[in-house]
Image (spheres, grey):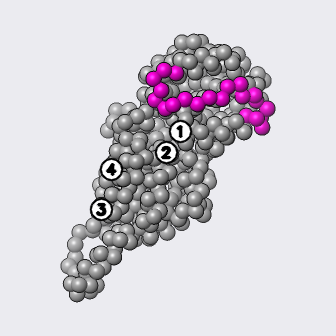
Amino acid sequence: MNGFRKLLASAALSALGVIAGVLPAAAAEPVKVGYIIPLSGGAAASIGQEMSRATHMAVEQINAAGGITSLGGAPLDLLEVDSRGDPKVALTEAERLITVEDVSVMIGAFQSSVTFPATAVAEKYGVPWIVDLAAKADITERGYKYVFRPTQVPSSGNADSVVDFVTWANEKTGDPAKTAAIIYENTDWGQDLAQRLRQRFDEAGIEVVLDESYPANAPDLRPLVLKVKGRKPDVISVTAYAADAIQLHKLIAQMQIDAKAVIGSGAGQVDPSFIPSVGEAGTEGIVSTNGWAGYESTINTPFARDFWDSYVATYGTEPSEFSVVAYSVVWILKDALERAGSAEPDAIRDALAETRFEGNDVAKLLGYDVVFDEKGQNTRKRFVVQQISDGVYRTVWPEQVAAPGYEMKWRAGKAAH
């Protein structure tokens, strides 16, 4: 119950002369959870739909297992809203969920451009918000007390992994990349990532020969890909959601651009629609950062295997990083509610701040621990790099989580591992 609603409730009880201890026993009240996610309206919708499926599955499993024990078995009541990828919609809906629906906590909203302004609404009303995958650095750099980001790091962490991977591959293959192209959508996410890539490529001694943005959901990216071909970069960094990534990679394949590596930034290239849309031949050898190391590295506990089997049985497709993160966020919330023993936003906020997921089932599924710093950022999150081979994502970096027996392909160079 937020402060405004709490004040009204308190006044009403006082007026009726109600005192603690005389109310009849009642079933545990559901804990209202506001959930904003893109389900339509743009390139991010397919990812949002996948995340929504995993979120609902986690809520259903928790409720079926008895709800929140410390709250007398209170079930989670998920109030889902489609942001349509529109920050204005998210602002309006965040306000409504908090002041009208009286939610105790918010989760979502995948896109940085949506999450950044919407979390400001939650902060204003003192309602905690668990951010899932939005990567804009400033989300946890505003001195907020109610915003927590357990399963994502700022775009700088994603860009760092791209350049660290290239540096590693340069040494491993003996065929170093000396030039790079950076192409990215002109959103907060794309711009943040590109800024860091410029800095890190420069520090690594790799010349950036093309640095160009494009409007998200662009109808025709052929002119941009022609520019890439003309500059002949050794590596190409592509920051795009599914629709644009599919178009870009189809064009790169059609134009037979011969780079040592085409590297995605953990969005469109790991979307479930990517390989079926581009085709196995067009995606062969593409690498991408990913926030999740995949089946071979993380599905090794009964909890993880139950998640995997349930997801596949329910939805007929394998989960990806998006569904893993969405599923895990709900379990992080459950843990906080159990320790808070209350549905009051301030109590949930304080419990979230003390979260320590170190080596437990959820941490093993994610592939990293969850411990928040004073800004609400989980500093233990890390990216891996995967390569598509025969239509399958294989983890190639870092070496300690690499797929056993798989040799990374570095075009015009020798295999690594």
Seen from the viewer's position, the closer of residues 164 and 221 is: 221
Rounded to the nearest angstrom, the CA distance separating label 2 from label 3 is 24 Å
Q: Which mark is residue 113?
A: 2
Q: Which stretch appears magenta?
A: 201-221
Total number of numbered labels? 4
Nearer mark to the viewer, of 4 and 3: 3
User: How far across and down, in percent of the image, does residue 60 sit?
Assistant: 31, 51
Q: Which residue is mark 4?
A: 80
Q: Is residue 105 above or below residue 117?
A: below
Placement of the N terminus among the 4 image quadrants: bottom left
Task: Tell me the SS state at disc 3.
Answer: loop
Nearer mark to the viewer, of 2 and 4: 2
Q: Earlier in the sequence, mark 1 or mark 3?
A: 3
Q: Which residue is mark 3?
A: 100
**Label 4 sits on what residue type?**
Glu
Q: Residue at x 37, y 45 (%)?
A: 83
Q: Is residue 276 above or below residue 41?
A: above
Q: Residue at x 45, y 47 (%)?
A: 114
Rounded to the nearest angstrom, the CA distance separating label 1 from label 2 is 7 Å
Which of the 4 image quadrants contains residue 30?
bottom left
Q: Earlier in the sequence, mark 1 or mark 4?
A: 4
